[in-house]
Image (cartoon, rainbow, N blue to C red):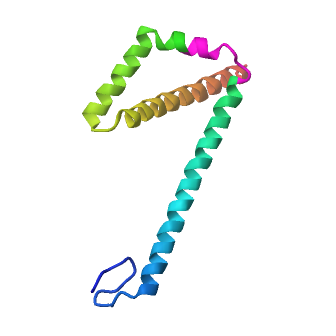
Amino acid sequence: MWNLHPGMKPGAPQNASYSADVALEMKRKAEESAQRARLNQVFNTALVSSRSESHPDSAREIQALMDTPAFGAILQSIQLLAGEQGHSEMDAAREVIRTFRKMESLWTEYLVAEGVNRLQSP
């Protein structure tokens, strides 16, 4: 039987040793990926939980914000973007958040630079 695996040349017979090596490599990569995903979750959980230690009323504030019309508008925009772009709602939410954070960062940099310029002006 002639099966092509990554790295095999057309017409080369498949041997059991090569197949076992490919299977082991695929298993190793899957295990590394699973370990990385687990460590990502551990890191993110630690990051979020470490912030909550200093803000005990955050849960109440978050709930209050989620109940506002402004937050409802954000959720609607996420659904609209997901539908228009053919993305999942999670991907659309991430895109909205990345865009907002980038805008906020750029404006912060701009305003800090303006403040520094005013302080330096005679």
Find out whether residue 54 is within the magenta segment: yes
Tell me which corner region of the image, top left, top right, bottom left or bottom right, holds residue 109. top right
**Residue lying farthest to the bottom in this orientation:** 12
Residue 8 falls in image quadrant: bottom left
Give percent across and percent down for residue 39. Answer: 62, 48
- Give 24 or 112, whichever is nearer the viewer: 24
Q: Residue at x 54, y 67 (%)?
A: 28
Q: Position of residue 61 (x, y in %)?
A: 59, 12
Front residue of 74/34: it is 34
Name the image quarter holding the C terminus.
top right
First to last magenta residue range = 53-62
Q: Residue at x 39, y 14 (%)?
A: 72
For the image, the number of numbered tags is 0
Q: Residue at x 32, y 80 (%)?
A: 4
Where residue 42 sits in the image (x, y, percent)?
64, 42
Q: Residue at point 67% right, 36% down?
A: 46
Reply above or below: 29 against 113.
Answer: below
Q: Is residue 43 above or below residue 11?
A: above
Does 82 lie within the magenta span? no
Figure quadrant of the N terminus: bottom left
In the depicted structure, whether residue 57 falls above or below residue 21? above
Residue 27 at what x, y percent from top left? 50, 67
